Image: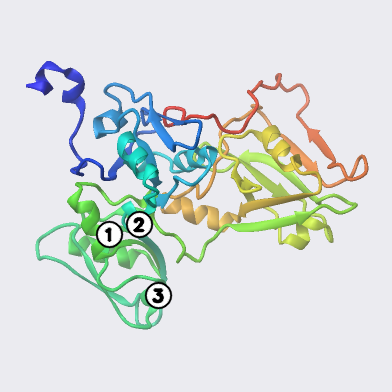
Amino acid sequence: KDGIDNPALSLAEDTDGEAAGEPRFYLLSKGSAETFGFCLHEELGGRGHVVGQVELGGLAQRRGLRDGDRLLQVNGRFVDHLDHQRVVQRIKASGNQVLLAVLDGDSYAAAKALGRDLAQLLPADVRPRLCHVRRDKNGFGFSVSGPEGTKGTFQLSVRHGGPADRAGVPTGSWLLELNGASVRSCSRAQLARKLKQSGSKVTLLVASGAVEEFYRLRGLQVPAAAADASWLPYKARELRMVKGPGGYGFLLKEDDCGAGAIGQFLWEVDAGLAAERAGMREGDRVLAVNGESIEGLDHQQTVLRIRAHEDRVTLLVIDPASDEFYRSVRLGDPRAAGRARLWGGSQPQTRVGRSLQGSRLAVELHEPRNSPPRCSFPAGAVPSAVPRGR
């Protein structure tokens, strides 16, 4: 009756099944033209990350998120202790799918008043695992079993010491994706063909029995966005640089980075200067500056981030091969992605290397001639609220 008389109630899908006072888990999956349908606020006094402005009939409201919920986890990682901007960046970097764990406001306040460790309210690890397996002369080192005649249900037996074991595939785990594509609709014969077509290497998204059960009991699909990628051979690198008399010694250039996105790339690394000594390689893409994602920043804003500390900077970068790998398994943006194109023709670039005045960083903006006026953006890298999922 309430659902009939109150349209707002009829829109909410009861998918969480959690008791009052316990964390609730929601997997939000949107299309590229859709939004998550909520904002994230920060209250004064350290009262957590607050869900607000939940759109009536929007994705978040349909899944069950409520105004006043406190966000505890993003993609299986505890975030209550993080500063607000980093939490916003984690949600944005998740792309079109994100797994959230929340606690209602009253329960959150009560737990804080009692001094409870909120991380203890959550399961230890709800993340699936991404593993990259290279075939040896005996194969990939795993076999597949499952109910006869049932599609998409595949359990892996792993040979001890074999390629799959060395790549981190747990024996008894469930196969969810193969090379970035779901296997939910695959038969045993179709899966065998896909494995054969993979050649000498294959990337698997797998979940242990406990992780698979966690999602199944809540009616949730296991999200690739929440995967533990620590077993992958492809990783981002951290470059720590202290500027010398010749500056840092590299060129920062904005360019396409695939799928219509824009990124900031490193080129013309000067021999013997700080960038080369830190291990910078031409073609690396910048993911973060001084521990903060550059997701959403344009070229000029990224330069200002690099210049924020006059004599030192730390860049998180990824090489082209690793970048391409993450895109191939639908994790094409491991930390950040450029969004705004400021010029329609050739891209802006900045020389980061020559000293102009003492220890100040030299910045020479090279812009195309006869380019249209530069767009004006508000100060600050990331807004204080999740901008409706964009």
In which quadrant is the C terminus drawn? top left
Is 138 left or right of 288, judged from the image as shown? left
For label 1, the SS is helix
Chain-order first, disc 1 or disc 3 = 3
Residue at horizontal 18%, vertical 43%?
17
Position above or below: 295 against 132: above
Q: CA distance from mark 3 to mark 2?
A: 25 Å
Q: CA distance from mark 1 to mark 3?
A: 26 Å
Task: Check if mark 2's residue and mark 1's residue have beta carbons within 8 Å.
Answer: yes
Disc 3 packing (10 Å; few <14; some 14–19; many ≥20): some
Q: Amino acid at mark 2?
A: Arg
Q: Disc 1 marks which residue?
A: 211
Is 255 left or right of 168, judged from the image as shown? right
In front of the other: 27 or 334? 27
Chain-order first, disc 3 or disc 2 = 2
In front of the other: 346 or 119? 119
Position above or below: 272 against 181: below
Q: Disc 2 marks which residue?
A: 127
Is 222 left or right of 386, judged from the image as shown? left
Q: Disc 3 marks which residue?
A: 135
Chain-order first, disc 2 or disc 1 = 2
Counting from the top left corner in percent of width and height, residue 54 is at 34, 25
For label 2, the SS is loop
Q: How is the image coloured?
A: rainbow
